[in-house]
Image (tube, rainbow, N blue to C red):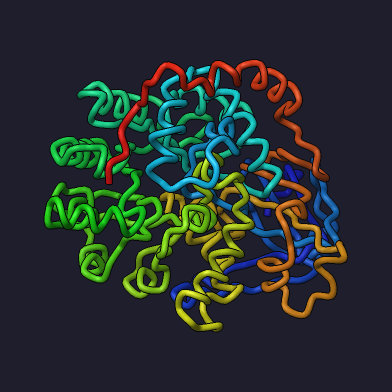
Amino acid sequence: MSASPADLIITGCTVLVHDEVHDEEERIAFREDAAIVVRDGVIEAVTTAAAAAELAAVERIEARGQVAMPGLVNCHTHAPMVALRGLAEDLPTEEWFNDIVWPVESNLTAKDVELGARLACAEMIRGGVTCFADHYFHMDVVADVVAECGMRAHLGEAYFSSQGPQGRERSVEFALRRRGAAGGRITTALAPHAPYTVTEADLTATAELARAHGLPVHLHAAENRDQTDTSLARHGVTPVEVLDRTGLLDTDLLIAHGTGIIERDLPLLERTDGRTAVATAPRGYLKFAWPDTTPVRALRAIGVPVGLATDGAASNNSLDVWESMALTSLIQKSTEGDPRWLTSRQALHHATLQSARAVGLGGDIGTLAAGRRADLILVDLTGPHTQPVHDLAATLVHSARSADVSTTIVDGRVLMRDRELLTLDVPAVVRELDQRLPALVDRSHGRRIQEYDT
C-alpha cells in the first residue's frame, strides 16, 4: 500500500467477500473486524482493522456493528416513473399500459423526467443501490442527474418502431455521446423497447449497430407467458427466437423479466455469441398476477447470470432492491418446491456480483476486492429485528431492510452518511414535482405513446 494517506478507510466492520476461485458455486464469506482502504475511487485493500489502525487517511469511518458489502445493482428500471407511483393500481397488464401509463407518458417533458430521476436516485441511494440500469426517455437529463448525484448507471434511450427511424437513431446517438460520461460512471446501451413494439427489421438493424459500435443492448423480452404464447400463435416463434433470428443474441444483451422464457429457448440462450443476462423484478410479477417468474435455476444451469431489479415504481411501487433480493429467494423456493433453493448466500450473490455482470460491469464492481471500484454500502445490524445473528447471510436477506443501510459510497465518494443524503435535496424535488403532477397525469387528450396488444 502507498505511504501517502488513503482517501478513505472504513474500519471495524464485517466485510462480505466473494470466493472468485470457486465462483461457479456462488460462494461468499464474511471477514470480521476488517477494514477497507480506498484510494482514487478504487479499493486498495481489504485487510484487518488492526493492520489499518496505523494507516493515515483523509477520512475514516468507524463501522463496528455494521456489515460492508458491495453496493446493490438495480439491473432494470425506469427511474423517472417514480412520478407515476400508485397511479395505475390493481389492473391487468393491458389496461395498465393502454388506459393509464402510455396515455400519461405522452405528456412527459424533460423536466418531468429530471425530477423523477432525482427522486429515484435519492430513493436508491437510501436503499443501498449504487448502480442502476435505466431504459427510458429523455435520457440526457437522467445522465445529468447521475453525474451530479454521484451514482453509477447503465443508460439506454428507449424507442418504438412507431417512432420511425428517428427513434432508433436517437438511441444510437445518445449511447455513443454519453458512453463513459461522469468520469466513467455512466455506461450506455441501445434500448429497443421489446419485440412486440419493435419490428424485426429494426431489431436486426439494432443488432448490427451494436456490433459496429461495440454497444450492448437492453430490452424487454418474454416478459410474461402471454407474450410468448401470443408470439407463437401469430408468428410461430417465441420472443427469444425473435432475438436469435434478428442477431440480438450475438450482442451483449440484457433481457428484462423473461418470465415467459420456455424450455425451447434455453439452448439458444446457452450458445449466444455475446454476453446474455436476464434481470428479474419479482414484486411486479406478483402485482400483475403473472403465473410464472423468471426461471432462475434453469438460467443458472446454462450459465446465464440473473441480476436483481425493481422495474419502474409505476408497477412495483418502490425501487427497493433489498426487497427484490428477499422475494427472489422466497419465490424461487416456492416455484421449485425446494427449500434449499435459492439460499441466502445465493441471493446475495445475485444481488451483488451477478447483478454487476448482468450490466457488463463484473470486472469493476460487485465484489469488495483490491482493484475494484469502491462502490459499497454499510448495513447497520444493531436493530432488534436483526438480532441475534446466527446466520449472517440469512440476517441480511430475510431480516435486514433497506432502511438499515447507513452509508452509501460510489467511486469512493460518500453519497449518504448515517442516513443523511449528501448529494440530493429531496424536499425541493418533491415540491417542484407536486406542482407539475396535474399536467403530467392528465389523460383527457386521448393520446397514447404506444398500443399494448399481446
Tell whether 76 sits left or right of 47.
Answer: left
Residue 272 rendering spot, x and y as whole percentages: 23, 60
30 vs 155: above or below = below
The quarter in which the N terminus is drawn is bottom right
- Quadrant in the rendering for residue 347: bottom right
Q: Nearer the viewer, residue 269 or 313?
A: 313
Residue 70 rendering spot, x and y as whole percentages: 62, 56
- Which residue: 70% across, 66% down? 396
- Which residue: 31% across, 43% down? 217
Q: Nearer the viewer, residue 102 or 184?
A: 102
- Quadrant in the rendering for residue 340: bottom right
- Which residue: 73% across, 21% down? 428
Numbered disc total: 0
Residue 44 rendering spot, x and y as whole percentages: 64, 53
- Which residue: 20% across, 24% down? 165
- Quadrant in the rendering for residue 265: bottom left
Q: Nearer the viewer, residue 135 or 68?
A: 135
Tell whether 36 sits left or right of 383.
Answer: left
Residue 99 rendering spot, x and y as whole percentages: 42, 33
